[in-house]
Amino acid sequence: MASKDVEMKPLTLDTDVEVKDKEKEKEKETVVKLTPAQEIKANVGMIQRGVSSMEPRFAHRVLRTLTGLRKMLTAEIISQAIDENLVKDGPAAKALKCYLQDSPSSMDVDTTSSSSASKDLPEVEMYLRLLLIHYLLSTPNNDSRKSALVLAKETVGKIQALNRRTMDPIGAKIWWAYGRAYEVVEDVQLAALRPELLAAQRTAALRRDDDTQAALINLLLRNYLHYNLFSQADKFISKTNFPQSAGNPQLARNHFYLGRIKAVQLSYTQAHTQFQQAIRRAPPATTAPGFYQAVHKFFIVVELLMGEIPERQMFRHVVLEKPLKPYAEIVRAVRAGSLSQFQATLQNYTAQFTADSTLTLLSRLRQNVIKTGLRKLSLAYSRISLRDICLKLHLESEEDAEYVVGKAIRDGVIEASIVHERGWMVQKGYELEPDETTHGGRHKAGPGNAKKAALNLGGKPSQGGETLIRSQGETGFMRGYGPEVVDVFGRRITFCLQLHNESVRAMRYPLNAHRKELVSVQAALEREKELSREVMRGEHDDDDDALGDL
Amino acid sequence: MAANIKQIHAKVLKSFSTNNPGTTALLAQAKLALIEAGLLVPVGEHHEQELIYARDILEIGAFWSIRVKDVPSFDRYFSQLQTFYSDYDGAIRPSDRKYALTGLNLIRLLTQNRISDFHTILESLPPETLQDNKFIRHPVNLERWLMEGSYSKVWNAREEAPAAEYRIFVDSLMGTIRNEIASCEEAAYNSLPMKDAETLLFFHNQQDLMAFTQKRGWQPDLIRHVFTFPSKADDKTAEIPSRKIIAQALTCAKELEQIV
């Protein structure tokens, strides 16, 4: 069941149907063992066990099957489950049943008084409610989705009134479904949900209800980002603590949202780490392709903005290949340092980039494209006139080129200097003495020719012999091990150690298990004593024998 | 109450359009009236027209602060307007001045070098306005040119400001640019002829140039007519961060101890 560990539904919506179909097929293969009704029955049993032993673990295990179960739900299965698991015709069962009927008028039945008198375990009732909400949400018709919203709202109110710690994991899921309902149902303003979520978040924080808190924080962030309210989202984050004990899916989402906020604020390094964490925490690509794709899109953009080129392998991934195609083209343009190609790609795919909300981030890449182009030029030429730079990078004037080059030098993109009098950019290490300027006598142009041809930057060395081709070896590639290496190494060690410590901490120690071990240890000690006694005796015997022999 | 607000609104509008120096005092009065009516930060239910009056007054206040070059006051007005722009979006008819003010705010952020705030605001605007709206396009272009280093374009664009209020920021923007250019030149050139420095830094007479370069510590060579730059901290001695390494090694040892 581990492959369906996580539910990542909201983001799967906007992605390839193809992958989803494959995933469904796989799901069918693995879950043939139980009929859905049986599975629900088993799950209910597990919930009861969890409540009686106060172990949240059981509830988590039940919720893990939710993704698979959700896809197989039908009205019959749910009504059967209600019949089997709740007191027959009790108020709770009745309340749920009326949502199953198609006529929306029957929903007016008074449902608030149900839980007080019933003998049903509230957790079980909530679980069935959760299933029902998911079923109603998956139906194509807007009316029943609306009734899901009503049901979710009512359920959420109940959960808050009951205030039971054993219900937290299920409660978190119901909140999530509630938020989802708001998104799916037409003609409902998502912003209207915000005050309610904020209030619930405060309550959850006070009750130290980590699961619900995690779900709510993510819902709120999602809500803010939906309206592009990045500064509000940022303030919200600074005021809240995301519970570290939250499950992987919520953590992954949180990393993703944080990464997006950081990317907008130009803290690319932080955004990069967040996205990386999100990818690591995310369920396998085939299980939640939508999330995986969305994170990778941002990941690539941020990596480009940091001046790095993403690995080619990423674009060959089965799940990623198709949706990432426009991004692959952007990467190609940036790599080539070609402004015109970059602009064309941006134009071609504007619609998709807008849908992914990466357009503004991508348009920040323009300067990176210029810098990459400059870096390429500076690698290939030891001296190049500003006019040539201007032509090759499609800049508008020589004057611009001078400023651009100057900025690149200051930012440490290239190691060079400008000779203003002659309008040159000169590689570091190739500066000529003032009286030598007529001909670069020190440098041989020979061995570099092949390299230049390979780079294929186009254009011939213009202005006579002034553009020299750089022979390799003198500059660059000379960096020794600086303090950065120590830093990186240290960071890796700390990461490994942390991983080790966390996994030790995550191990489960059943209660009183050490007693059993103690008994066996005692037995082992006894045996050892016995053995040593034997040995002693044996030794004596041996000695006797030996003596006897003598 | 509504009539009162309406009167004040009309008064402020008139005073603003005639560029009356008494507008500052009038605006203070208007704000008091708004507070009394519970409209400065709207609480509870209000009539649409009242909200629009309140918004208008605040907008005029923002423009006026720019005219009298009071940037902090502009900042306050602008944050008060945010409530009207985002929370009442759809409830009242959109303001014509919204984008002009947002553009002004963007320029202000740019001159104060608050690039990350700049981008946060850009992100919250609908994408098509970035290209189509003349008020927004101007700061967006300025930022792009600044980032890639096309300073001459920024210089030339200073006359193309879409509203008179934008000019106020131009001067401080030019100051920022000059400093940027100067720091680039320090890195990029070994020496720079004085004449060229003058054009590169957009100075029109030698005196300004001399004053500026003196501040940055450039050494003028009056015989060759070139500037030489104070040597940057080239001699970075490769220092071994011994304390840090020791600390790292010790933590590693401690952790290992725990594991074994």
Image: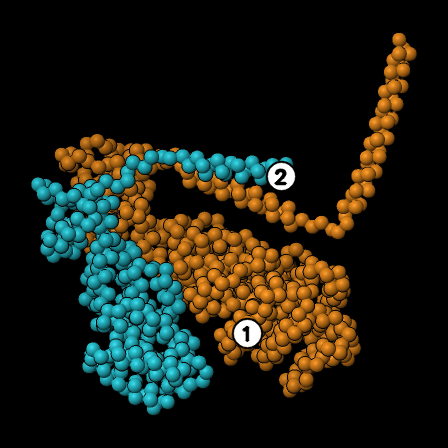
Chain colours: A orange, B cyan
Task: Look at 36% across and 75% down and name the residue there.
Answer: B81
Q: Amino acid at mark 2?
A: Ile
Task: Look at 48% across and 59% down and name the residue there.
Answer: A258
Residue A4: x and y in percent read 64, 59
- Return the residue nearer the eye: A394 or B162: B162
Task: Look at 53% across and 70% down and name the residue there.
Answer: A198
The subunit carrying tag 2 is B
The image quadrant that residue A64 belongs to is: bottom right
The residue carrying mark 1 is A196
Which residue reaches farthest right? Answer: A548
Which residue reaches farthest top? Answer: A550
Dot 1: element = helix
Q: Quadrant of the N terminus of chain A?
A: bottom right
Q: Report whether A391 appears left or right of A72.
A: left
The residue carrying mark 2 is B259
With respect to residue A430, does B44 lie above or below?
below
Instruction: Give the number of callouts.
Output: 2
With respect to residue A392, does B80 lie above or below?
below
Q: Report whether B61 appears left or right of A265.
A: left
Q: Quadrant of the C terminus of chain A?
A: top right
Residue A380: x and y in percent read 29, 41
Q: Report whether A422 appears left or right of A447.
A: left
Question: Could one spot residue B28 in this view of the protein?
Answer: yes
Dot 2: element = helix
Residue A526: x and y in percent read 84, 35
Q: Amino acid at mark 1?
A: Glu
The image quadrant that residue A135 belongs to is: bottom right
- Return the residue nearer the eye: B196 or B229: B229
Q: Report whether A352 appears left or right of B193.
A: right
Cα–Cα gap, marks 2 and 1: 47 Å
Question: Could one spot residue A17 in this view of the protein?
Answer: no
The subunit carrying tag 1 is A
